[in-house]
Image (cartoon, grey):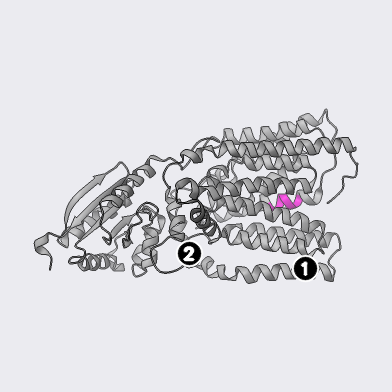
Amino acid sequence: MEQDPQELPSSEDRRLLNVGRALLGLSVLSWCLLMYPLLSGGPLVMDEHCSYWIIDSGLPGTSLMRSLDYAAIPPLSSWIQELFLTVLGKSELTFRLSSALCALGAIFITYLAGKELRSPLTGGLAALLVAWHPEAMDEVRIARCYGLVLMLGAAVIWATIRWQRTPRSLPAALFWSLSSIALLWTHYTSALLVILSGLAVAVSCWRKRDLNRATLSRMLLAVALLIVFCLPLVPTIFRLKEWGPILNFSGSDPSIWNLIGPFWWIGLPVGILFLLVALRRCSSGAISQSGLWMTGACSLLPLLMLAVLSSGEMSSLANPRYRVAYAPAGACFIALLLTHTRHWMTSLGATVVVLVAAWLLSPLGPWDMGRLGSPTEHEWRELNAFLSEHSKAGEPLLVQSGLTESYLVPVLTEDRVFLEYVACRVSRFYVDEPHPRYALPYIWNPQTGVIDFYRDLLESWKTKPGSFWVASATDTDLNQNSLNMIRTLAREAGYVETEQKSWHSAALLHFKRPSGDRE
């Protein structure tokens, strides 16, 4: 660890250690309060149904196959969620708990990273910034991968700091490599953090003229392990690139302010301004230059890259969730800047200013439920409950979930696994009886053969089982048109609509063949 050229007295060291630990404790307490909405989070949201489908599909295959061949994320977070459900039992809270606990782990690891960068005060402020980070809050509360992304992003930064300190250390190289592998097996867009952190170590060694045989061998080993263990992810990246023009559909171009986020464009400038005013009356200490440029590069450069990429066919990259991996690096960067003064109260005040400014201009408040508790999801929970109670095992389910992948249905009708994936909003989490599930398309283009496919499907069900259900979102014209089309095909095939339940954003229909018409 770099030593401050102006050694602080031991009493000052102890004071900063106590302050840093107190800030860590405050961060953990903040986590407990901010995760309180999980207790009343309500039914699964659509993204969570996708998460559950990965680990509990009724079709042949493994969670590894479903994740790499169909879903948009690697399977590491899914395996952890599966472990939690197996050990603690199936419930919405249990399903979401692993992400929330990983966010807690991110707080501790960020503290250690900041402490190693400069002081316990730096670590405590970085932990506080991660605990209250406005772009991570809503993402870590749901059963997706982003709590784990946040924790592993912090681990990669901590590993990078340690490896920069001791470039000849084999444990430090392995720590970075394993953290990076785990992060890439959690989310693909985190690759920017892995690449930039590895380059930071190489540049640091070059600047110190420490590129000897021992250092180079450690680097080659770390990179080789990374490549070997992440090779299975390459085909998935090409699949997502091929699906990109559809999966990255966005109805409007995001503004530059949304691409950057208020944490950076208002929080940081206001915090720095507060600090500069305060420094007129306060003495300042030395700052770790290597740590500053490393954390700055690992937080600001990915933000700029994502902004550039999202301006083209990959517009969905403007979503704040894709910046979660870089939150720990950003927190360390800002904490390092704000601990330029030895007066811990001034640094803490600047940090509070950063967070308050960022939250004031964020679309949601820290205790707002966000996607949890949506009235639409409550409607789908009622729809699923009705199906679970009134459907017969084996009755087919045709589903228009409202997933963007519905655009791909016409060209992938022969892929049963894909059709079930897109139909996952009628979830096995709530409807665990065996039902064949088929997704409905957004666009019914006759030239793709999709209409003939569903006509043949309905024809094959006339004698056995002689009935089927349609569950559809109705909150957009595309969803409503999809429902109207399958209803028309059912009537043409001789089915009768025997039951209909409607909600504000969803509808459930039951079709049967008249008993006298069954062959």
> Residue 63: which disc?
2
Q: What residue is shown at x 80% (from left), y 45% (from top)?
A: 118
Tell me the magenta residue range. 293-298
Q: Is residue 486 left or right of residue 187?
A: left
Q: Is 476 in the magenta?
A: no
Badge number at residue 80 = none
Q: Residue at x 40, y 69 (%)?
A: 60
Task: First in sequence, mark 1 or 2: give its number.
Answer: 2
The residue positioned 35% from the left and 63% from the top of the image is 409
Residue beneath label 1, please? 218
Q: Tell me, yes or no, if residue 413 can be seen here.
A: yes
Q: Pick the quarter of the image with the C terminus.
A: bottom left
Is disc 1 placed on a helix, strand or loop?
Answer: helix
Q: Is residue 341 visible?
A: no
Q: Residue at x 22, y 48 (%)?
A: 500
Residue 121 percent location from the top left of the image: 77, 39
- Is residue 500 found left or right of 317 in the rendered image? left
Q: Residues within 10 Å of mark 2 (few under 14, many from 20)?
A: many
- Circle 1 residues within 10 Å: few <14, some 14–19, many ≥20: many
Residue 15 placement (x, y as % from top left): 82, 35
1 or 2: mark nearer the eye: 2
- CA gap, disc 1 and disc 2: 33 Å
Residue type for callout 2: Ser
Identity, as a three-letter code, of the amino acid under mark 1: Arg
